[in-house]
Amino acid sequence: MSKKKVYWTLQVLGWTLLIMFEFIPFTLEYGFERTSFYSALANIFLAITLTHVYRLVIRKWNWSSLPLPRLALRVIVSVLGLGLIMAMVNQPLDRETLQNNLLHQPLVFWGYYSNWCKNLLSWILSYTVYHYVEQTRMAGYEKIMLKMSMRETEAKVLRSQLNPHFTFNALNSIRALVLEDPSKAQLSITQLSNILRNSLLADRRKTVDLQEELKTVEDYLELEKVRYEERLQYKLITNPQAIYWQIPPMMLQTLVENGIKHGVSKVMGGGFIEVKSEVVDEILVIRIRNSGNLGKTESGGVGLKNTAERLSILYGKGASFRVFQDEENVVCAEVRIPMLSESMLGGTQQELA
C-alpha cells in the first residue's frame, strides 16, 4: 500500500473511531438522536479537513527542516489554533447540552477546548515526528548521494592526472628505437597502444582485474627496458587466486613507474623491480619492491598521494597503502585491498544505512 493510501486510511479510520468512542456511550445513555449523529459526522469531516490542512502547511513550508525549538513552537500554536476552531464549532452544535450544563459547569467551553487540544496534539505530534524523521532520513540519503558523487568525481580527476606523465615517459622510451631497431620500435608502439587503450578506459571503470593491470605493467616495463636495457631487471609473481581480484585501474603502473623513477634510476649500475601479489586472509596484498633507499630518494610526490586517495575513495578504511624501507637498498610499496562487493561497486551501502 502506498504512503498516500496509508495516510488517508489512518485519517478516516482514526478520527471516526475517536468521535464514535464518544458518540456511542452518549447514545447508549441518552438514546439515539439524529442531531447528535450529524454532529458526530460533522466533527469527523472537520477534524480530517483541519489536520489535512496542517499536513499541507508543514510540507509546503518544510517545517520538518526547522530546529526543534522553532518546530515545537509551531506545533503548539497549531494545536491551540485548531483546538479553538473545533471547540467554537462544537459549542453551537451542542447548544442544548451546553445550556443544561452551563449552570453547573461555567467553564464547560474550556473543557471542550482542552479535550480537542489533547486529541489534536496526539495527531499533530505523531505526524510531525514521523515527517521529521522521514525528512532527516531523506536529507541523510541526499547527503550520502552527494558525497558519493563527489568521491566519484575526485576519483576520475585523480585517474586523469596519471595519464600525461605516463604517456610522456613511454614516448621517450620508444623514441630511441625508431632508428636503431625499427622492428622492436613497432613492437613497442603496439605495447604503448595497448597501454594507452587501458589508460583511456581507466576513466570509465572503477576497477579492473588484477591480471589485466599486470599486463599493462608488463608492457610498461618492457618499454622501460628499452631505455634502461640491462640496468633494469624485473619480476612479476602472482598467486592464481588473485588474478581476478578487482583493483583500481592504472594503480600498479603508477607505483611501478614511481619505483623506477625514484629508485632504480637513482642507483648506479641500475637495479630491479619486483611485483608480487597474493591473497592473505581474504585481503589482496601487493608488494612492489625496487632498488633504492628512502633516505636518499624522493618520496614520489603526486603519484603516491593519488594512490592513497584513490584507495580511500573506493574502499574507505578497508584498504591500506604504505611505502617503507624493506631492507638495505630495497624500498617496498605495499597495497592491501579487500574484496570489492557489488554494493561497493554501486555505492557504499553502509553509508546509506
Image (cartoon, helix red, strand yellow):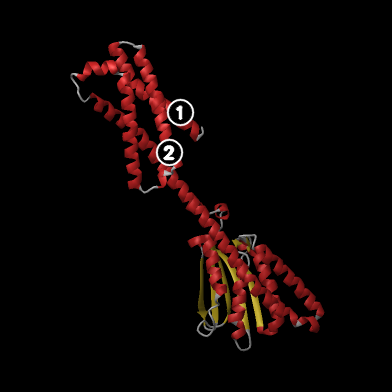
Give the alpha-carbon distance from disc 2 to disc 1, as whole Å: 20 Å
Front-most of 164 and 292?
Answer: 164
Residue under label 1, please give it: 9
Asked whether the viewer can see residue 119, the reply is: no
Check disc 2: other Cα within 10 Å, few if <14, some if 14-19, many if 20+. few
44 in relation to 178, above or below: above
- The reply to whether residue 320 is in sight is yes
Which residue type does callout 2 highlight?
Answer: Val
Query: At numbered mark 2, what does the secondary structure look like: helix, strand or loop?
Result: helix
Give the amino acid at mark 1: Thr
For marks 2 and 1, give the one nearer the viewer: 2
Image spot of residue 154 (x, y percent)? 56, 63
Q: Is residue 216 above or below residue 179?
A: above
Left or right: 287 as drawn, with respect to 98: right
Of the residues under marks 2 and 1, which one precedes in the sequence? Answer: 1
The numbered disc on residue 57 is 2
Residue nearest the observer in this picture, 340 or 9: 9
- Residue at the (32%, 14%) spot, across then down: 27
What is the number of the mark on residue 150?
A: none
The percent coordinates of residue 13 (x first, y second) are: 42, 25
Residue 351 image point, x, y percent: 48, 53
Q: Say which quarter of the image contains residue 15.
A: top left
Give the camera-side residue of 135 and 120: 120
Quarter occupied by residue 244: bottom right
Q: Horizontally, is 14 left or right of 290 in the view? A: left
Q: Secondary structure at mark 1?
A: helix
